[in-house]
Every structure is written in structure tokens, then in C-alpha cells.
């Protein structure tokens, strides 16, 4: 699996959900939701709503989602979770809206740059 696209950056699940619902997430986008990890969001919310909304729009195979939060067992499509920054101080803190992100999956592990 390979995915290359522009970052759509959100500092919370709620902000991402509003944008997805408003149709501002399109084919090839990479949704980046930060500050939902253990330090950013007490209780480390499960990001079921954004992944469900993306799937409901028929975009689960063409939109990637990266987060420092966690996913449910129902997550579909190219999604990368908590191996990334858990505090917003890692590379997700440096991402800007529109940055091009490339994800390449090799035998079950993903890398980005």
C-alpha cells in the first residue's frame, strides 16, 4: 500500500470531524489529528467517528488518517496510530496544512516522511 497526499491538519478529533462532515476532506488527503494522545487528551479518546465518517463518504481507501490517538477495531483504510508522537512534540507538531505526506506500507508496518 502506498499513499501520497496533502496533509489536512487538525488539533483535535472534534475539529477533524467538523471538516469531514462539511466535505472538506477529499480523495488523496492525509488527515492528521494531533493532540489526542495520552498527554493531549485525557483518557486517549478512540477516533471512531472520523474513521467512520471517512468510510461513510466512500473514502476509506483513498484518504489516509494519521494520529497520536487510538483507533477502534472497526477502523478501515490506511490509518497510522500511536507509534507517532504522543505529545504533539514529535513530527506531527511540525506538520503544516498542505504538506505532502508519503506513506509506504512494507509487510504490515508503515513509514511516512
Image (cartoon, rainbow, N blue to C red):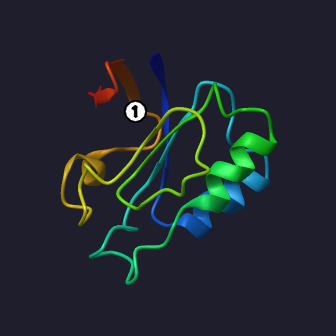
Residue 80, image x, y percentages: 40, 42
The answer to which of 6 and 86 lies nearer the viewer is 86
Residue 49, image x, y percentages: 66, 61
- Residue 113 higher or lower than 96, as above or below: above
Quadrant where the C terminus lies? top left
Q: Residues within 10 Å of mark 1 (few under 14, many from 20)?
A: some
- The residue depicted at 49 percent of the width and 30 percent of the height is 6
- Residue 41 higher or lower than 7, as above or below: below
Q: Is residue 14 left or right of residue 110?
A: right
- Residue 72 higher or lower than 84, as above or below: below
Secondary structure under badge 1? loop
Residue extending furthest toward the bottom: 42
Q: Which residue is mark 1?
A: 99
Number of on-image labels: 1
- Residue 2 higher or lower than 76, as above or below: above
Q: Is residue 17 left or right of residue 98?
A: right
Residue 31, image x, y percentages: 52, 43
Residue 104, image x, y percentages: 35, 19
Residue extending furthest toward the left: 90
Name which quarter of the figure residue 48 lies in: bottom right
Q: Is residue 18 left or right of residue 16?
A: right
- The residue depicted at 71 percent of the width and 32 percent of the height is 59
- The residue depicted at 64 percent of the width and 55 percent of the height is 50
Amino acid at each position: 500500500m502506498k499513499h501520497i497526499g496533502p496533509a489536512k491538519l487538525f488539533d483535535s478529533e472534534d475539529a477533524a470531524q467538523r471538516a469531514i462532515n462539511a466535505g472538506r476532506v477529499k480523495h488523496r488527503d492525509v488527515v492528521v489529528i494531533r493532540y489526542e494522545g495520552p498527554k493531549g487528551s485525557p483518557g486517549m479518546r478512540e477516533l471512531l467517528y472520523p474513521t467512520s465518517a471517512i468510510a461513510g463518504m466512500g473514502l476509506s481507501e483513498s484518504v489516509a488518517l494519521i494520529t497520536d490517538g487510538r483507533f477502534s477495531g472497526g477502523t478501515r483504510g490506511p490509518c497510522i496510530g500511536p507509534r507517532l508522537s504522543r505529545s504533539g512534540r514529535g513530527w506531527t507538531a511540525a506538520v503544516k496544512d498542505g504538506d505532502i505526506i508519503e506513506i509506504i506500507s512494507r509487510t504490515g508496518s508503515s513509514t511516512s516522511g
